[in-house]
Amino acid sequence: MRPVVGVLTVAVLGVVVALAAAMFRGGFARTETITVLSPRAGLVMNPDARVQYRGVQVGKVSSIELLPGEQAAIHLAIDADRLDVIPANVNVNIASTTVFGAKFVQLSPPDVPTRDSVHPGQVLGADHVMVEVNTIFGQLVSVLSSIQSEKLNETLGAIATAMNGRGHQFGRTLSDLNSILGELNPSLSSLNHDLAVAPAVFGTYADVTPDLLDVVQSGTAISRTIVDRQRDLDSVLVSATGLAEIGDQVLNENRQPLTDVLRLLAPTTDLTNEYNQALTCALGGMDVMANNPPLDVPGVQVLAGFLWGQERYRYPENVPKVAAKGGPFCTNLPKVPYQQIAPFVVTDVGANPWKYNNPGIVLNSDGLKQLLFGTIPGPPRNSAQIGMPG
């Protein structure tokens, strides 16, 4: 009986281990196949390599197929339950933890993911394959193969000779460079601003360059003219020097008379300045009259008309003032508009013909009453002072 129990125990343990290994390898997981086309699969890209999305494993590499044109088709076994979370335009990178490490497929979400998710059988393109050590060695070998060894040896020897015994100086140079960079570092923001606005400044300089060249050419012509006319310029300077000496002598000898003349002219100029507006209007009107068409010669021109009667001067309201003050009034001078009369300026230095608002001819009412009724004793009956007294 004991041998049978032992055999069953070993069999059960074997089944448990097999089931655990199968579950660990994903033998019971339902997967869907997606293909990735890549320029190359990488040195250490093997089946069962991990497939990660956002750092979480969502599948594994089932197989790798070599295609014509040195391309590789990497078939991915993605968990069927994870397909819905992977967008259809997902980015595919073949990466590794180190240069010598094993490769894995890294899926990353795009900037603008689509609403559709990947579907079974979809073909994706690899965006980037991590640089590997064989690529670095291949590029290094290609660079070294293009370099001549004797020239490289000569260059290295020259560098060694130049730096031999100058380690202290080289270290001092690096220390000074570090100090300079430390002082320059606070000004990097200003430097960045200057570099940002430099294109606009250079564009402005480019736009004004033709004008600047014209100025330079004009300056060259002026300089050439000055050189060619050097003797004339010397003569002008000598004459100007002589004139200055004579003028200095004249001013020194006549300083007091010139001062007196200017002092006497001051009141006249002040009065002229006070009436400059009136003088300007008068001279402007005279200029207009001087430019009018001439009269018919021989001949006579008569301009006549009838005007309404105006108010007389009254005492003491209209007595003229002595030394009255008031600015000049040019009204419409020097050019009076056609068929217009200059406006009347109301002042307190004379009679105002529109003060009583007489609309028509002013009659001598006192004379009319005497004509009708004879002489009436007493003062004139015109208390409102309308028209003539009476």
Image (spheres, rainbow, N blue to C red):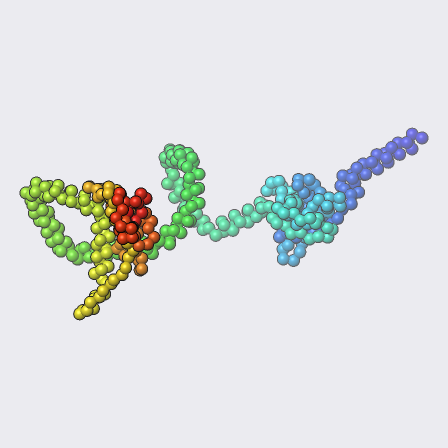
Instruction: Determine the image quadrant of residue 288.
Output: bottom left
Above or below residue 111? Residue 298 is below
Q: Give the image location of residue 177, x and y in percent.
A: 39, 36
In the picture, the quarter occupied by the N terminus is top right
x%, y% of residue 151? 42, 49
In the foreground, 185 or 365: 365
- Tell me the residue at 63%/55% (across/down): 70
Image coordinates of residue 273 in percent, x first then y, are 21, 45
Name, please, the residue furthest toward the front: 374
Task: Determine the residue positioned at 24% across, 43% down.
Answer: 315
Q: Nearer the viewer, residue 144 or 35?
A: 35
Q: Nearer the viewer, residue 253 or 389?
A: 389
Res 213 seen here: no
Q: Is residue 5 among the parts visible in the rendering?
A: yes
Q: Outermost residue toward the bottom?
A: 298
Residue at 42% across / 41% down in the picture? 191
Q: Residue furthest right?
A: 1
Q: Is residue 128 left or right of residue 182?
A: right
- Asked where in the image residue 6 lies, by quadrant, the reply is top right
Of residue 144 and residue 248, the one placed in the foreground of this image is 248
Identify the residue at the far left of this view.
253
**Image quadrant of residue 181?**
top left
Q: How many marks?
A: 0
**Residue at the spot 92% in from the left edge and 29% down from the top edge:** 2
Which x, y percent locates residue 279?
Answer: 21, 50
